[in-house]
Amino acid sequence: MTTPMTGTREDWLSARLALLEEEKELTRRSDEIAEHRRQLPWVKISKHYQLQTDQGTVPLSALFRGRSQLLVYHFMFGTDYTAGCPSCSSIADGFNGVFVHLENHDVAFWAVSRGPLAKLQQFKKRMGWSFDWASSAESDFNHDFNVWFTPEEQINGGIEYNYRREPPMPEPLAGKTVQQWELKGSEGPVAQIASMTGTDVATYTRDRPGVSAFAMRDGEIYHTYSSYARGLDGLWGMYQWLDRAPLGRNEEGVWWRHHDRYGV
């Protein structure tokens, strides 16, 4: 942890104005990158995905609910999980207050996981969430969008996540760490996170987090964008607040929990 400096109000104001220029440049650069996202080519989706929802089994097109855009959060909740990934859960804690605004701006919002719908519904009730959540357990949706991989792909080096090919993982992973969950200054104890989902490391890491965007035009669906790993950082609300706290993220290892498990 960096030792904070002390100084006068004049010292603070001078440093703050210098930082303000950096923050303004970051904002301008962020706007430029957002424009570059919108300039990506759209890819037509030809596969007919079927998803399980509270309203029954529906095609991907039904998730739009009459809107022209769809955002999907790929929530890590595999078929063998007994609880959602705690990291995805802490991100999802911010969805309830956001999705209603998206839906009133021509953007549908859903979380999608491979877990059976009954498990998702049970966990959703436990967490007190109200956003829409669909199961892709009976489709290739998660695999096609690079957020789920088979045991064979894991063992043979067939995982391509965040646009990079991962090395084979032929030996048991229990208690070990992997680079994808490395935290600043330390390695994330993936076994600890996996245990919160009721799985082992190998099972846990076959599912991955991500966000994907889709557009509907003339009855056709197009994939427009996907992001993974640290590309989700801006969606993780607690970190945006911690980055503005006096000590910043100030973390060693995994400290967060499901929000109903602090103090347990």
Image (tube, grey):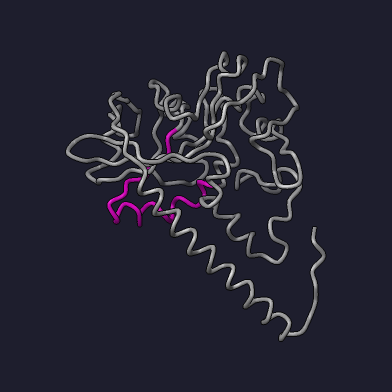
Q: Is residue 203 visible?
A: yes
Q: Is residue 264 visible?
A: no
Residue 37 position in % (x across, y down): 40, 48
Toward the viewer: 101 or 38? 38
Relative side of 78 to 112, left or right: right
- The mark total stands at 0
- Residue 164, above or below 156: below
Residue 258 lies in what quarter of the image? Answer: top right
Residue 255 position in % (x across, y down): 71, 46
The magenta segment: 91-112
Residue 183 position in % (x across, y down): 70, 44
Relative side of 248 to 159, left or right: right
Q: Is residue 99 magenta?
A: yes
Residue 59 position in % (x across, y down): 28, 29
For image coordinates 39% across by 33% down, the residue present is: 134
For image coordinates 41% across by 29% down, the residue present is: 135
Relative side of 74 to 45, left or right: right
Residue 222 lies in what quarter of the image? Answer: top left
For image coordinates 25% across by 46% down, the residue present is: 67
- Residue 177, above or below 238: above
- Residue 114, above or below 72: above
Toward the viewer: 255 or 125? 255
Q: Quadrant of the N terminus?
A: bottom right
Q: Is residue 229 magenta?
A: no
For image coordinates 29% across by 56% down, the residue present is: 104
Relative side of 98 to 209, left or right: left
Q: Residue furthest left?
A: 218
Q: Quadrant of the C terminus?
A: top right
Toward the viewer: 85 or 170? 170
